[in-house]
Image: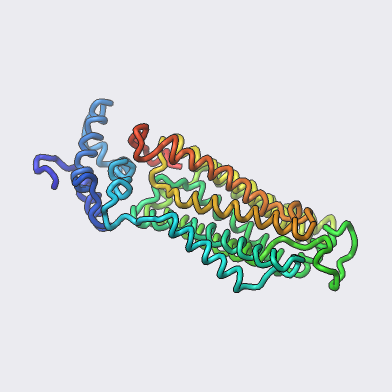
Amino acid sequence: MVNNTTKEKPGMVKSYSSTMETDGSLGINGRSVVDLTARNHSRHENENSESGSSTHGNNSAKKPYLHEKLSMDDDIMISSRINNGSNDTPQYNIKTWSFCIFLGGAFLGLALPKNPHLPSRTWQILSNVVGYTYFLAWSLSFYPQIFLNRQRRTTRGLSVDFCVLNVLGYICYTIYTTNFYWNDEVIRAYKDRMSTGDKYDDNETSTQKGAITVQGNDVAFAIHAILMASLTLSQIGIYDTFIIRPPSRRVYFVLFATSAFCLLYLLSTWIFQGQVNFLGFLYVLGTIKIGVTIGKYVPQALLNRSRKSTVGWNVWNVILDLTGGFLSLLQLVGDCADMRDWTGITGNPAKLALALVTICFDVIFLVQHYLLYPVDGPSYSPLPAIESTDIT
């Protein structure tokens, strides 16, 4: 319970504690959120008085003050991780989830259509199983962060730039995969290009060069990913608003430059070639996806480093992401080896780079979470107080 002698600022501590209580009672070592809020509020008052803050009116007039300062406090934000006995804390069992993912991938791989371009019947089945297992792992990697944002009623700790770039990248990847999988003109143009100039014959065998390595599970993942990435981005607007947490100017520049370059490419090919080179445009989108994949992870890694913490950012997202990356790479290499055609790797650079970049950055994130800034470790330090203008 809150000490009756504790002074509250009107409209600040009380409103915050009531907001937290809507999620259920979160406590640390038997202390309620109200206790922690009052204690931390008092601590911030002392810090402000030491730094030269003179009146309460100046602080209370700054509306984002409470939201920024207290919502980033480590005692409150990680309470669900420390208080393992709380009913509000989701318990993740890695063995159970791993078994369910691989079982679901095996079921989908056996039940859904196989890739007819693969000469080996055995690898057709294994490739489908591996592909839909990576589809489940990568698809499920979106949900822990979404649930965490909803439980905390805030997206603090999650980079806004990461979310915006994530949506941009998956828009490009969805267009890329759906056209390579369903667009007959793109498929024919690709086969002509990869068959060293020989015209593609509809009766050619599956072992001939030019078979596309984009599969149904790639398309399913891309469509699901754009929906979940958009939902995660919308949570920033719902829980924190984009006025308080706007994207950086760098992201606005990337969005403008990407749109301008795509339009310029389409216009230039139409003017100089007499028609739009749509296959080349898809490779442009694939290249954009590769660049965005690299760029979107950097803000999150830098945010973790500047805060010396990974609180507010769900590590299960990384574990599932890493699993999907390995399996996606395994499927791509295995398909090319089975067809004895390694042009399938160079012909599908987006899938190759997506897997490799994902693996590299996920390893960095795991090092940050478990070694550099562990929540329960002795090196863990409180989250720094940040102002609304400093939020990325």
Residue nearest the observer in this picture, 250 or 219: 219
Residue 201 location (% of width, % of height) = 87, 70
Q: Residue at x 81, y 64 (%)?
A: 207
* In the displayed structure image, the side of residue 271 where residue 102 appears, left or right: left
Residue 257 location (% of width, % of height) = 64, 47
Q: Residue at x 67, y 62 (%)?
A: 177
State whether residue 67 appears in this view: no
Residue 221, quarter of the rendered image: bottom right
* In the displayed structure image, the side of residue 99 where residue 169 appears, left or right: right
Residue reaching furthest to the left: 4
State whether residue 369 appears in this view: yes
Residue 94 location (% of width, % of height) = 44, 54
* In the displayed structure image, the side of residue 167 where residue 95 appears, left or right: left
Residue nearest the observer in this picture, 363 or 263: 363
Is 21 placed above or below 373 here?
below
Residue 366 location (% of width, % of height) = 48, 42
Q: How is the image coloured?
A: rainbow
Is 334 placed above or below 67 here?
below
Q: Residue at x 55, y 46 (%)?
A: 296
Residue 226, quarter of the rendered image: bottom right
Residue reaching furthest to the right: 198
Q: Residue at x 83, y 69 (%)?
A: 205
Numbered marks: total: 0
Residue 295, quarter of the rendered image: top right
Residue nearest the observer in this picture, 306 or 30: 30
Residue nearest the observer in this picture, 364 or 133: 133
